[in-house]
Amino acid sequence: MKCPYCGHNDDRVLDTRVQKDGSIRRRRECLECKARFSTVETLMLNFPLIIKKDGRRENYSKEKILKGLQAACQKRPVSLSQLESVVERISAWIINRGENEISSRIIGKKVMAELKQLDDVAYVRFSSVYRTFKDVQEFVETLEDAELVDFVDNSQDQLPLTAFNPTAKVIL
């Protein structure tokens, strides 16, 4: 490790600790100038490229998934640590697929599956933005699939309009 103070290449490790996120923090001392400094080592994972709907390719971003989850879970009883756990599960799932590229649609479906287990309302919010519904009926079907509503045909339960008399005088 190169000393950030004098540029010398020899140092010794004074202390090593594993952080909560799995990274390794090392306290070092330069053998030349005796300056002390810390380094953090993290594993570099090679995520596949994400293929967007329009065919563009971009790098995988945990932050982007977390922002989408936070938007879906806004004002819901879901903690940040729960959302971070979801992001970690999705990231591990993507890595374990072992592919060089993956469609954003596949990732979106995985996010929806995770949200459905976490919070039904957040699932519907996310799917309403992520999916393109053709009409209201398709949206209602999504709600039914999430078991959030019991769709009932109320057409027979409506009051008739025959009681309305448009020529009646209104006294104020």
Image (cartoon, rainbow, N blue to C red):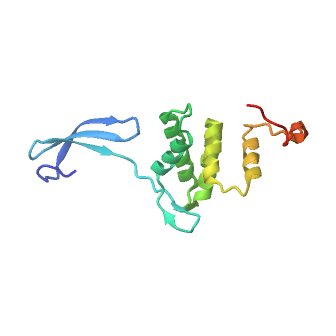
Quarter of the image with the C terminus is top right
Q: Position of residue 23 (x, y in %)?
A: 37, 41
Image location of residue 148, percent across then percent down: 72, 37
Residue 156 appears left or right of 111? right
Residue displayed at 52% across by 35% down: 82
What residue lies at 57% left-to-right and 67% top-to-bottom?
54
Residue at figure coordinates x 51%, y 65% from the top left: 57
Name of the residue lying farthest toward the bottom: 55
Residue 87 as seen in the image, left or right of residue 8: right
Q: Quadrant of residue 27?
A: top left
At 64% across and 49% down in the image, what residue appears? 128
Picture quadrant of residue 28 = top left
Residue 119 percent coordinates (x, y): 62, 36
Vertical arrangement, residue 77 with respect to residue 146, above or below: above
Number of numbered markers: 0
From the top left corner, tell me how far across and down residue 67 is, in percent: 49, 46
- Residue 129 as seen in the image, left or right of residue 8: right
